[in-house]
Amino acid sequence: MKTYNLEVYSLQDYELVMIFRPATDDEGVTSTLERLEKTVNDDGGSVNERKDWGLRKLSHPIQHFSEGNYIFTILNMEAATAIKIEKNMSASQEVMRYLLLKRD
């Protein structure tokens, strides 16, 4: 009898930190966050928490910027959705860096 790893198909908690370009206006940030939320919700997940950490100095320049606008989110989603999120973050012009981690 074949067994399946159901953990792959179950919802997991993730933390996502995004660093937006300092020149990105509120509309650009909101647009990116709405796309993120739509992707998560369409796949049956949810955005549980979102915190705007604001404009902070970077430890080293990224793309010639010394500051970035930090956004922290807690997401509940499947692993397949996490892969979609990573692809979207990599392709985004507004996001300089991101870190997506699965919570234990």
Image (cartoon, grey):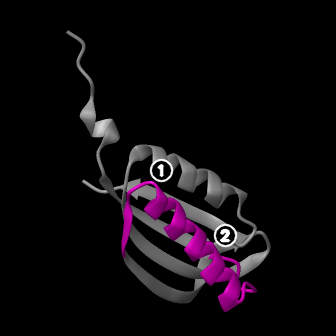
Q: Position of residue 64 (x, y in %)?
A: 79, 74
Tag 1 and tag 2, C-beta contact below 8 Å: no
Q: Is residue 13 visible?
A: yes
Task: State which region is magenta.
Answer: 20-48
In the image, farthest residue toward the right: 64
In the image, farthest residue toward the left: 1
**The quadrant where residue 8 appears:** top left
**The quadrant where residue 95 appears:** bottom right
Q: Nearer the viewer, residue 49 or 34?
A: 34
Q: Is residue 46 magenta?
A: yes
Q: Which residue in the protein does label 2 denote? A: 95
Q: Position of residue 22 (x, y in %)?
A: 70, 85
**The quadrant where residue 60 appears:** bottom right
Q: Residues within 10 Å of mark 1 (few under 14, many from 20)?
A: some
Q: Residues within 10 Å of mark 2 (few under 14, many from 20)?
A: many
Residue at the image position 56 percent from the left and 75 percent from the top: 33
What's under tag 1, amino acid-wise? Thr
Question: Element under label 1?
Answer: helix
First-in-chain label (1 vs 2): 1
User: What's the CA distance linking mark 1 and mark 2?
Assistant: 18 Å
Residue at the image position 27 percent from the left and 24 percent from the top: 4
Is residue 95 rendered to the left or right of residue 80?
right
In this rendering, the count of numbered labels is: 2
Q: Nearer the viewer, residue 94 or 41?
A: 41
Q: Which residue in the protein does label 1 denote? A: 81
Q: Position of residue 2 (x, y in %)?
A: 24, 13
Q: Which mark is residue 1?
A: none
Q: Quadrant of the N terminus?
A: top left
